[in-house]
Image (cartoon, rainbow, N blue to C red):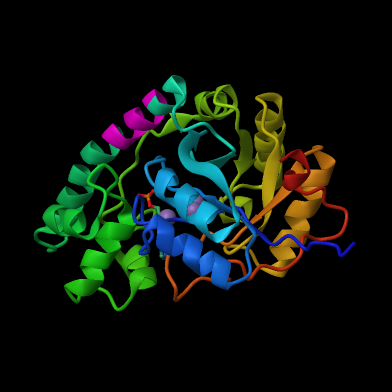
Amino acid sequence: MATVVRQYDLHTHSTYSDGVLGPAGVVDRAVAAGVTCLALSDHDETGGLHEASWRAWELGIELIRGVEISVTWRAHTLHVIGLHIDPDHAGLRAGLARIRAGRHERACRIAQGLERAGVAGSLQGARAHAANPELVSRTHFARYLVQQGHARDLNAAFRRFLGAGAVGYVTHQWAELEEALNWITVSGGLPVLAHPARYKLDHAQREALLSTFRDLGGVAVEVVSGNHTPDQAAVWARYAARFGLLASAGSDFHRPTGGRHGIGHLPELPSGCVPVWTKF
Ligand code: AMP
Ligand code: MN
Ligand code: MN
Ligand code: MN
């Protein structure tokens, strides 16, 4: 019997958060790239999973129901993905609704900062770029800044206006790590620490995070990521192994151009990793 090669991409975004394709469009693009097992993992939002599941069923691929939860841990913003969550679970739904509500108030403060820097109308502008009124993210502000000619591209918009320390940057209290892991696990999901190389943590902080994450029920680390270089993947493969955590792989797809890896175009996990899909 022929071996079936599975192609995984376990981290993607649709217009329900800050991606540019609708859920069916994300699935179509994944299928075109040869993905057979796809997770849609919108920020703090599960509304796109219904459409994505239908499209995946029509096209004969597996759709993992996911979410990427925004977390504050020791004043750092972290992202934790839940794979195989039940989006109808009351505890998860209430938690995500609370985070989305916090985004409204945060967006107002971001707009005030930008106003002081001479950027007018950014709250309306960001909202106009957000297909989901419940989910206004910095990406939508960045699109407005580019559209208005304040920045050359998204990266420049983050550097100059929206990144840590910039005029439009505001601190914000997201979910606690413990509650995010709890929402994921009570709804039947597997918690995965997203793109760990992106966080500005020293070695001791990384170790503290991974041991806390594991003790709270964390299952995997995103070793291969659209945000990671091959060297970073190797580093995080070793951290995962040392803490007995499984390894995940996801492009963090938002849009057809830009990003290190396109949807589905991911390198293999480094040798020695135990893939998170052994738990599926
Ligand atoms: P938020 O959750 O509202 O803070 O927005 C975070 C999102 O901004 C991330 O999920 C990325 O999609 C996006 N982002 C962060 N940094 C950059 C960057 N330098 N260039 C483009 N997009 C970025
Ligand atoms: Mn994003
Ligand atoms: Mn993220
Ligand atoms: Mn993401």
Magenta span: 94-101
| Residue 223 horizontal side relative to residue 164, left or right | right
Judge whether residue 117 is colored magenta. no
Give residue 279's quadrant in the image: top right
Image point (81%, 61%), residue name:
270
Image point (15%, 59%), residue name:
125
* Vertical position of residue 75 compared to residue 226: above or below: above
Image point (55%, 65%), residue name:
30
Q: Is residue 150 visible?
A: no
Front in this rendered view, residue 145 or 91? 91
Which quadrant is the N terminus positioned in?
A: bottom right
Which quadrant is the C terminus positioned in?
A: top right
Q: Position of residue 129 (x, y in %)?
A: 22, 60
Give residue 45's quadrant in the image: top left
Q: Is residue 180 visible?
A: yes
Q: What is the chief secondary structure element of the magenta stretch?
A: helix
| Residue 233 horizontal side relative to residue 176, left or right | right
Q: Position of residue 265 (x, y in %)?
A: 63, 71
Q: Position of residue 141 (x, y in %)?
A: 25, 59
| Residue 233 horizontal side relative to residue 200, left or right | right
